C-alpha cells in the first residue's frame, strides 16, 4: 500500500507541474538611439495570449504593434506615425 501511495503522489505532482497558469509582464527600456521601447504580454493560462510592442525614437516616430494569439490563430495590428 505504501508503494501505491507514493506512486500516486508522484503522478499528481507531475501533472500539476505541467498545468497552464495565467501570467503577465511589462518591460520598458531605453533603446540604443536614445528612444524608448516597451513590451507587455499576458496569458490566461487557457491558451489565449495578448500583448503589445512599442517603440518611440527621438524624432517623434512612434510604432505600436498589438497582438492576440488564441484558438483563432495569431492576429496583429500596427499603428504608426512614420
Image: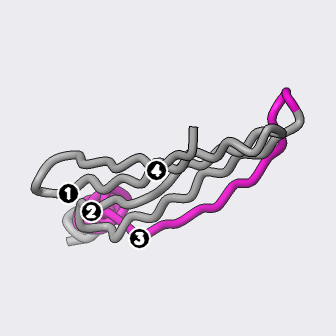
Residue at which label 4 appears? 79
Label 2–label 1 contact, CB within 8 A: yes
Check the image and name the residue furthest to the left.
Answer: 72
* Residue 7 falls left or right of residue 22: left
- Of 74 and 4, nearer the camera is 74
Q: Quadrant of residue 50?
A: bottom left
Question: Residue drawn 68% across and 42% down?
Answer: 61
Q: Which residue is mark 2?
A: 48
Mark 3, residue position? 22
Residue extent of the magenta highlight = 8-33
Q: Residue furthest right?
A: 34
> What SS does tag 1 mark?
strand
Q: SS at mark 2?
A: loop
Q: Earlier in the sequence, mark 2 or mark 4?
A: 2
Instruction: Give the mark, 2 or 1, whose residue is nearer the N terminus.
Output: 2
Q: Residues within 10 Å of mark 1 (few under 14, many from 20)?
A: few
Colour convention of the picture: one colour
What is the x, y in percent for residue 76? 31, 47
User: How far apart are the alpha carbons under marks 4 and 1?
Assistant: 21 Å
Which quarter of the figure is the N terminus placed in?
bottom left
Q: CA distance from mark 1 to mark 3?
A: 14 Å
Residue 68: horizontal and vertical position, in percent? 30, 56
User: Which of 4 and 73 lies nearest the eye of the viewer?
Assistant: 73
Q: Are marks 3 and 2 in contact (CB under 8 Å)?
A: no
Q: Which label lies toward us, 3 or 4?
A: 4
**Residue at horizontal 49 percent and vertical 54 percent from the top:** 52
Q: Which residue is mark 1?
A: 70
Q: Is residue 14 magenta?
A: yes
Amino acid at each position: 500500500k505504501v508503494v501505491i501511495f507514493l506512486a500516486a503522489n508522484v503522478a499528481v505532482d507531475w501533472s500539476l507541474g505541467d498545468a497552464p497558469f495565467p501570467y503577465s509582464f511589462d518591460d520598458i527600456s531605453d533603446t540604443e538611439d536614445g528612444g524608448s521601447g516597451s513590451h507587455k504580454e499576458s496569458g490566461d493560462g487557457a491558451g489565449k495570449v495578448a500583448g503589445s510592442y512599442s517603440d518611440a525614437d527621438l524624432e517623434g516616430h512612434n510604432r505600436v504593434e498589438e497582438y492576440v494569439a488564441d484558438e483563432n490563430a495569431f492576429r496583429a495590428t500596427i499603428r504608426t506615425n512614420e
